[in-house]
Image (spheres, rainbow, N blue to C red):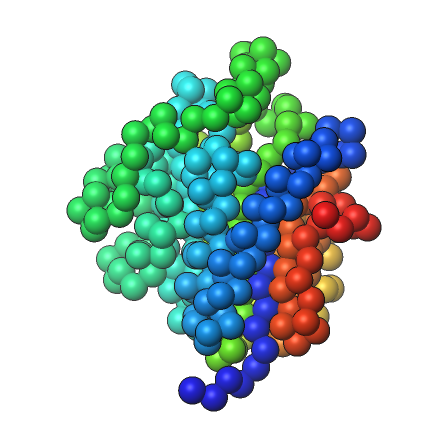
Amino acid sequence: MINKMPFALCIHGGAGVITPENLSQKDKKIIKNDLILALNAGEKILAEGGSAVDAVAAAVVALENSIHFNAGKGAVYSREGKHLLEASIMNGATLEAGAVANSMKIKNPVLFAKSLLENKDLIMISGEAADNLAEQTNHELVENDYFDTDFRKEQFLEAKKISETTSFLDHTNLKMGTVGAVALDRNGNIAAATSTGGMTNKLDGRIGDSAIIGAGTYANNKTCGVSCTGVGEYFIRATVSSMVSNLMEFGKMSLAQAAEITIKGHLTQLGGEGGLIAIDKHGNINFSYNSQGMYRGFINEKKNEKKVFIWDDEEL
Ligand code: ASP
């Protein structure tokens, strides 16, 4: 196979009120380590000429398996004290997509979503039906308490104190931790994937942007791939991920212009908070966010760069 172009990969581990005051040096180190492991997992596939779809899934699996992010193990608790998981993935070469919402048992929701990419009958499935289909198609299932962690339990109890009677949307100052990845492979194919436990104390049954193609995840070889993190209700209303692609395709904008307008203009005007990671068909990488921080990292093979960040100016 002729390697036509250098690959690129970017990942995120959530946005939110991540300030120097609420993140210890020890936690920073741990987060950095896990972000690098996720980059390595995707890099291995891309460097060997593998597909963008396989690379984003591998990077997201690494983050789902870390207890430090709100996806897979370490997912937040719903109002009834459960973990209800969501993930989506899109192949920019074919525009095929797969998504799952409100799963209670699938160990790695992104792998299940990936298995739906070629399913002609459905793109998105939720709840018990998703868990049943995952079982029938030999995905690894776990009991819901597999996803338990002390940190998320404390966060849940804290959130309950604040908002027993009000919406979970009123306390977005809690650290989030949704994960995602976008890749451009050596054949010029783009893919994006996102995975989450949603919002702490969310109403059981609520579905956020991370499960929705065009809101939290989008990929199109003609333009770019995008994965989002933030308060999902706003990302759904702002159709964030597809808007970036549409501004590029139909508005003839660069990735940087389209991402900036979508996050700093459209999303911010609606009152939404969070950010996105994106890669265009030329390998340009973009991180746009209006929150205080966003855990993120990238590999740019062309420039021989591999970095992880939290704030604009601080590399981990
Ligand atoms: N977007 C996720 C949701 O609303 C949360 C997050 O990104 O932290 O479910």
- Residue lying at 39% horizontally and 24% vertically, measured from the top left: 82
**Whole-percent x, y for residue 165 in the image:** 55, 12
Q: Is residue 313 left or right of residue 96?
A: right
Q: Is residue 84 left or right of residue 76?
A: left
Q: Position of residue 212 (x, y in %)?
A: 45, 48
Q: Measured from the top left, where is residue 158 in percent x and y? A: 59, 15
- In this view, 109 is above or below 96: above
Q: Farthest residue toward the left?
A: 136
- The tally of labels here is 0
Depth check, front residue: 82 or 268: 82
State the residue lying farthest toward the bottom: 2
141 over 157 or under it: above or below = below
Q: Say which residue appears at 62% left-offset and 39% top-offset.
A: 30
The answer to whether residue 132 of the structure is visible from this angle is: yes
Q: Residue at x 61, y 14 (%)?
A: 162
Q: 268 or 311, which lies in front?
A: 311
Q: Quadrant of the N terminus?
A: bottom left
Residue 129: x, y in percent?
Answer: 24, 39
Q: On the rendered structure, is 142 left or right of 255?
A: left
Residue 216 visible at all: no
